[in-house]
């Protein structure tokens, strides 16, 4: 006999409190956990499942893949949330919690097929040039996306920035990332100028003097993540880009805020920056996480191939005329 559905969902509030208090889990992660648990609860209710067993979890995976069109990475995250919750139920000594099937679900190895690829330098320039900085909203949005591209910040990290996080005297920005890990960034003159321009007009927004958030909406609230995502979607839509990324060539991908973070890492990699430095800047606990973000440009791949001894030798033979290549005409 498995854990009943009624038993299973009775401990969500206690789980969230445990994660917040003991592990100091970030607000963004807590929100993701709640979304995942609520989604699974809705699924169980719709299917009228009485117990949380293997067939129920497998059906949930099919539902995520086929009906919700979730990527492998998104499915992995939801299963990981449920697995963490199941561990909590075991600690709470909920009867038969050790029989929950989440431990047996294998990770989707195609998890990052749909990862956003890096934009080119020209595409980045086109994107930023398209932002209308003649108005307050444009100045704000330019600063937001500049932080994502120039410093590689997550959209949730930009959302959580407060005015007090900027140290203009030392030209530094302190960011609270995943796992409540703090990172301090040096602000170059260009980034200082961009932030100064935003702060010079921030007072024009409602409730600005009472809000500690760095970026606020027209109504005076901390600017929502959804708004940041929607605004970049509109910008790209106006550019009429049709991008097919090599990470997942069978489909086109949207350019999102996270694309700018990937682009930041890939451009650093193309400039020869050490992966451990990139890892530190991105706020990753492991280099394995950083490797996912790095997409070497075609130019760098070509340069690497040309350095192979066999390729160098063949080029020498071609240049000296020892080796000649003859191509057959294309058949009609």
Image (tube, rainbow, N blue to C red):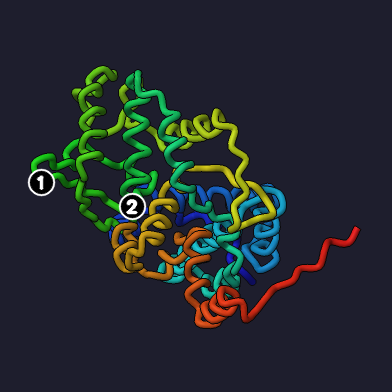
Q: From the top left corner, tell me how far across and down residue 198 is, in percent.
A: 26, 28
User: What element does badge 1 sit on?
Assistant: loop
Alpha-carbon span between mark 1 and mark 2: 27 Å
Q: From the top left corner, tell me how far across and down residue 211 is, in percent.
A: 23, 28
Q: Residues within 10 Å of mark 2 (few under 14, many from 20)?
A: some
Q: Which residue is mark 2?
A: 26
Q: Nearer the viewer, mark 1 or mark 2?
A: 1
Q: Is residue 231 left or right of residue 43?
A: left
Q: Which image quarter: residue 141?
A: top left
Dot placed on the residue nearer the N-terminal end, 1 or 2:
2
User: What element does badge 2 sit on?
Assistant: loop
The relative height of residue 310 versus residue 84 in the rendered view (above or below) is: below
Residue 170 marker: 1
Q: Nearer the viewer, residue 131 or 103?
A: 131
Q: Say which residue appears at 64% left-offset and 72% top-offset.
A: 1
Q: Residues within 10 Å of mark 1 (few under 14, many from 20)?
A: few
Q: Which image quarter: residue 330?
A: bottom right
Q: Nearer the viewer, residue 211 or 46?
A: 211
Q: Are marks 1 and 2 in contact (CB under 8 Å)?
A: no
Quadrant containing the C terminus in the rendered view: bottom right
The relative height of residue 168 versus residue 180 in the rendered view (above or below) is: above
Q: Is residue 167 left or right of residue 309?
A: left
Q: Say which residue appears at 57% left-offset and 69% top-offset.
A: 107
């Amino acid at each position: 006999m498995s854990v009943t559905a009624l038993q299973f969902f009775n401990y969500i509030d206690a789980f969230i409190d445990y994660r917040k208090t003991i592990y100091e889990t970030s607000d963004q992660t807590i929100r993701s956990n709640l979304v995942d648990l609520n989604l699974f609860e809705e699924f169980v209710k719709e299917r009228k499942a009485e117990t949380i067993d293997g067939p129920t979890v497998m059906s949930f995976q099919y539902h995520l893949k086929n009906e919700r069109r979730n990527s492998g990475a998104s499915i992995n995250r939801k299963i990981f949330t449920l697995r963490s919750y199941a561990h909590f139920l075991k600690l709470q000594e909920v009867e038969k919690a050790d029989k929950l099937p989440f431990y047996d679900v294998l990770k989707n190895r195609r998890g990052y097929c749909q990862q956003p690829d890096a934009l080119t330098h020209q595409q980045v320039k086109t994107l930023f040039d398209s932002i209308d900085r003649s108005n307050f909203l444009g100045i704000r949005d330019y600063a937001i996306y500049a932080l994502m591209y120039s410093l590689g910040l997550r959209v949730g990290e930009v959302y959580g920035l407060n005015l007090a996080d900027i140290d203009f005297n030392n030209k530094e920005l302190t960011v609270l990332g995943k796992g409540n890990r703090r990172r301090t960034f040096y602000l170059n003159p260009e980034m200082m100028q961009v932030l100064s321009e935003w702060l010079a007009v921030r007072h024009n927004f409602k409730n600005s003097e009472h809000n500690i958030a760095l970026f606020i909406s027209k109504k005076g609230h901390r600017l929502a993540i959804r708004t940041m995502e929607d605004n970049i979607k509109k910008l790209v839509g106006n550019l009429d880009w049709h991008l097919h990324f090599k990470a997942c060539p069978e489909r086109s991908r949207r350019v999102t805020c996270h694309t700018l973070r990937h682009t930041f890492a890939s451009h650093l990699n193309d400039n020869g920056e050490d992966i451990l430095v990139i890892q530190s800047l991105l706020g990753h606990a492991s280099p394995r996480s950083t490797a996912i973000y790095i997409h070497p440009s075609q130019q760098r791949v070509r340069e690497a191939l040309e350095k192979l001894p066999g390729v160098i030798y063949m080029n020498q033979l071609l240049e000296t005329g020892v080796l000649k290549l003859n191509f057959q005409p294309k058949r009609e």
